[in-house]
Image (cartoon, rainbow, N blue to C red):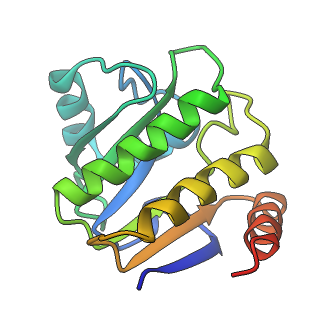
Amino acid sequence: MTDIHIDQGDLTAYAVDAIVNAANNDLTLGGGLAGAIRRAAGDELRAECDRHGSIAVGEAAITGAGKLPAGYVIHQASMRLGGRTTAEALRSSTQAVLALAEQNGVRTLAFPATGTGIAGFDIRRCAEIMLHEVLEHVRGETTLTDVYFVLHSERDYRTFHEVYESLGL
């Protein structure tokens, strides 16, 4: 059984096996959440992302976490640099994150509201897609014991909480 948690807070402070970075497909840690993760993790993470190189939109990549309290950062590429997130890119990149989590024995995972910052995706639609994909995933065999959705703003927290409650869980 996997517990789902909806929290308001700072994703970079979560001591979990892996946090998820709302990334562009070049793994450039520029602004928004990616910039906050880069600042908290230090130069080691940026260098590892540079070595890894680009991935396709809709995919994910895993790196170490530098100075973060998490063990890994899973970079969820829901957009191109300077681009917008689409529903399909969010869905497939969420699935890719979950697959990488399984492949790496991740038990505790913390997601942001991917694509809702500079990529401009609607927060309610984000919550619907991400919660659906996570719930579908944890219905099967999984290493995950806890999945956190860590939302920066009160509005985003309320929206994710409302969507989660509407699912009747």
Residue at x-position 82% and y-position 61%: 159
The location of residue 55, given as percent across then percent down, is 31, 21
The location of residue 143, given as percent across then percent down, is 26, 72
Residue 93 visible, this orientation: yes
Q: Nearer the viewer, residue 118 or 94?
A: 94
Residue 22 visible, this orientation: no
Residue at x-position 39% and y-position 66%: 109
Quadrant for residue 110, please give it.
bottom left
The location of residue 21, given as percent across then percent down, is 44, 44
Placement of the N terminus among the 4 image quadrants: bottom left
Q: Nearer the viewer, residue 97 or 132?
A: 132
Placement of the C terminus among the 4 image quadrants: bottom right
The location of residue 129, given as percent across then percent down, is 65, 48
Numbered disc total: 0
| Above or below for 34 versus 109 | above
Residue at x-position 19% and y-position 40%: 44
Quadrant for residue 102, please give it.
bottom left
| Above or below for 57 versus 117 | above
Q: Nearer the viewer, residue 45 or 138?
A: 138
Residue at x-position 73% and y-position 70%: 164
| Above or below for 144 versus 91 | below
| Above or below for 26 versus 93 | above
